[in-house]
Image (cartoon, rainbow, N blue to C red):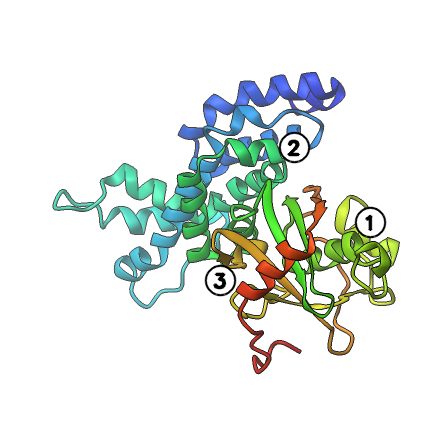
Amino acid sequence: MGDTARAGGPASATAAVEALAPWLPGLAGDFAKTAVLAGACVEWGGSPMALADVLPQRAAEAMMLNGLVPGCWAEAAPGRPLPEPVSGSTAELVQALVTLARPEGRPDKGDMTRIAMSWFDMEDWLKALITVLGHGSFRAAVPPRVKAELREYAAAVADRSQRAAWVRDLAAVLDEEPLVVLHPPARRGYVLTMSGVGDNFQLHTLLADRLVGDSDQGMVPGERPDRSWVAAATDADPYLGPDNPALRRFRLFDGHGAYVHPEGVPADIKPLDGTRVLVLHPPNGHYGMGVGRVFQNMIPTLTLDRVLGADEAERWLTRIAPAVENDFMAS
């Protein structure tokens, strides 16, 4: 199926995704690689939308079950190290866990088998989910409740899975999100709309590209970002390398005065009266990143909708709290 879908173009790849989607809820173990095939079909140009009602829920379940494995194993096989999360060790884990299955409030043998399978198949579900969450239309189709579950379960296993950490952040991506940016030295403000921005350093670069310019035209004075940085943060190769890091042009604080860490995500920015607000401060030294964006297949948009009038900008500026400059990270 994979070769046919790839050779047949987007229509063929979409048809393959639609054919595979109904099978996913009942699959586990090595059969979870069916989800990886579906994700590959999306990479080959297929629409991911047939997966919206099944893949996020199945990936959330896999992470939730995976989070149960260490505790179950410690009870079933005290003192023994967990098997490596590869399918060849499935029998050992299943055999140990099914001994815990009892009628008195315990999961039955089938449920314990599914828990055991999650130790080996979770990465396959996550690999597919990361691919499709890069599409704005797919993110819009995932209910907020399911996104919340993805963030919760991903956070619980992110310490042992980089893909889970990526899913946690992708499930928090903001789309069509209004953003007010203030520049106190010039008493100016701007309204923007952002979608698909994966982390705050990427946001730094895109903001500098949209806002730094001729102060006589109402823009923020300063040095514009290199075009290669902006391209890496948008849709070009994201890797800039050590000789050409993207340098931030300012430090960001939120409307409550808290420092906005470049390593965080836009969803971390606490709204002020229902709107996310960023306050621009001069940079301290040279803080750079060799990667323009974390999620290569997620293309961001950041639109400057309008420059605030003087009175409106002043109303926003009077509402923000002073920056907490003594935050040792705000350097």
The mark that comes first in sequence, 1 or 3, is: 3
* Residue, disc 3: 159
Quote the CA–CA distance across marks 1 and 3. 31 Å
* Residue, disc 2: 40
| Residue found 76% across the figure and 20% down from its top | 7
Quadrant where the N terminus is found in the figure: top right
- The spot of residue 153 in percent (x, y) is 41, 50
Res 311 → quadrant: bottom right
Res 310 → quadrant: bottom right
Tag 2 and tag 1, C-beta contact below 8 Å = no
Q: Which mark is residue 231?
A: 1
Report helix, strand or loop for mark 1: helix
Q: Is residue 179 visible?
A: yes
| Residue found 32% across the figure and 47% down from its top | 95
Looking at the picture, which amino acid does disc 1 mark? Ala
Looking at the picture, which amino acid does disc 3 mark? Asp
- The spot of residue 92 in percent (x, y) is 38, 50
Instruction: Say few, some or many: other residues with alpha carbon within 10 Å of mark 1 (under 14 / 14 to 19 / 20 or more).
Output: some
- The spot of residue 83 in percent (x, y) is 43, 56
Q: Nearer the viewer, residue 23 or 112?
A: 23
Quote the CA–CA distance across marks 2 and 3. 26 Å
- Residue 173 in the image: above or below residue 251: above
Looking at the picture, which amino acid does disc 2 mark? Ala
| Residue found 65% across the figure and 30% down from its top | 42
Instruction: Say few, some or many: other residues with alpha carbon within 10 Å of mark 2 (under 14 / 14 to 19 / 20 or more).
Output: many
Instruction: Say few, some or many: other residues with alpha carbon within 10 Å of mark 3 (under 14 / 14 to 19 / 20 or more).
Output: few
Q: Which mark is residue 266?
A: none
